[in-house]
Amino acid sequence: MSLADLTLTQAADAIRKGDVSPVEVVEAVLDRALRVQPVLRPFLWLDPDRVRDEARRRAQEVPGGLLHGVPVTLKDLIAERGAPFTCGSKLREGVVAEEDAEVTRRLRAAGAVLVGRAHLHEFAFGVSNENPHFGPARNPWDPERSPGGSSGGSAVAVATGCTYGSVGTDTGGSVRIPAALCGVVGIKPTYERVPRQGVFPLAPSLDHVGPLARTVEDVAVLLEVLAATPGRYTAALGEGLRGLRLGVPRGPYWEVLHPGVASCFQEALRCLEGEGARRVTVDFPWEAASAVATALLLVEAASVHAEFVRAQPNGYGPDVRDRLLVGLCLPAERYVQALRARRALAEASRQLWGSVDLVATPTVPIPAPRLGEAVTEVAGAHHDTRALLTRFTNPFNALGLPALSVPCGFADSLPVGLQLVGPPWEEARVLAAGAAYERARGRLPRPEV
């Protein structure tokens, strides 16, 4: 087995014990990345010499931080001093970050070695990772399919062993969707749990920064670094599920579901119940929460890009430009109504947490769609593919709740994700439940690379 196939925690432990050096680990990861990149395109930029220099510096230091010598990747929306900062757009061609984002600084302080700039949907405004300027990132389980987005490159890099972990952003599901479609773990923490300083915004009131990795434990370690909460999440990972009230939504909104995904989800629920969780049916205006998130996203993204989309509309890819123009046309009244509705939904969600401890849903209602697939058939009806991909993740951005995606099987030989959602600031509870499920579920195969 290559060192690139270790988990983040295993690699960190091996370096800390002196069993391997940061240089050996980085060489293994770079070897994998250079083989994967021409086919799957997880990176927009990769400079092996820069990475090797950093590994040699780490090898001369006494291991101290949680991530000493461990290769980690950043989505090219997160500033990294001296590296390209394109946000996946030709409009920012030649832009190099002058300062680190706060999360980048924290990763460096923990000893991480930063590897490349991860591919993304242009300006993170999309969920397919089909980028008209740089071409698509491709799903490691089937290169003709989407890896999901907008943090698609991050998920591909993690799934294929090009890195042990990555940091992405999630505005409507952009960490959890690619995690689910590529068969890795990803978490969107509570809104503002992780600082956004130095992260290019999409919709500031919905943007979250969160990690992706191969296991729940790895994600917990990364989140402790990103949120500056040492020991807070890993300490709870051994907790069981006995007595946990697991809310399962019902209603037509959740019935738009690929049968293979539905089967995996039901099997995951049975597994959780077998570990002591108790299923509770819950009703909540999820569709309204999703509509609120969409309205806020369109208006806020248009505000971020207003100057440039008016001056250089053709500098954007067609899909992103069209959505920005829609946002510019929405009346202020629509935005104010969405803000009021979000306040009402937040109050209703507080009542929800009186009856359940967590909510469980499929992360995405379909397996990975084919690249270029604008419409997908589910249960005999045709649906907009983009709307399907965000259908089960979008509501939780509107509410700012911590939400984890963990692999729960395969449908049509493609990965399926289980989403576990908790009350605000309860990342420890969400991660502990995810780890308990992961242990009970057992090992799943990884893509061949």
Image (cartoon, grey):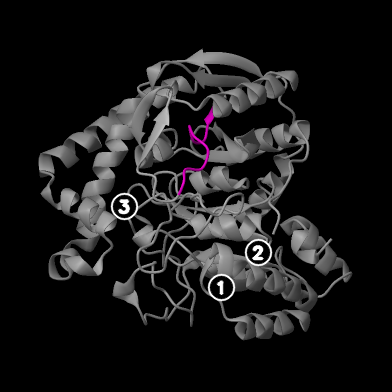
Residue 440 image position (x, y, % from top left): 77, 31
Q: What's the mark number on residue 203?
A: 3
Three-letter amino acid code at disc 2?
Answer: Thr
Q: Quadrant of the N terminus?
A: bottom right
Residue 373 image position (x, y, % from top left): 39, 45
Distance, label 2 to label 3, CA atoms, is: 28 Å
Q: Is residue 303 above or below residue 416?
A: below
Q: Secondary structure at mark 1?
A: strand
Q: Residues within 10 Å of mark 1 (few under 14, many from 20)?
A: many
State yes or no: discs 1 and 2 in contact (Cβ < 8 Å).
Answer: yes
Residue 171 image position (x, y, % from top left): 39, 48
Residue 214 image position (x, y, % from top left): 68, 51
Three-letter amino acid code at disc 3?
Answer: Ala
Magenta range is 360-370
Q: Residues within 10 Å of mark 3 (few under 14, many from 20)?
A: many
Q: Which residue is mark 1?
A: 116
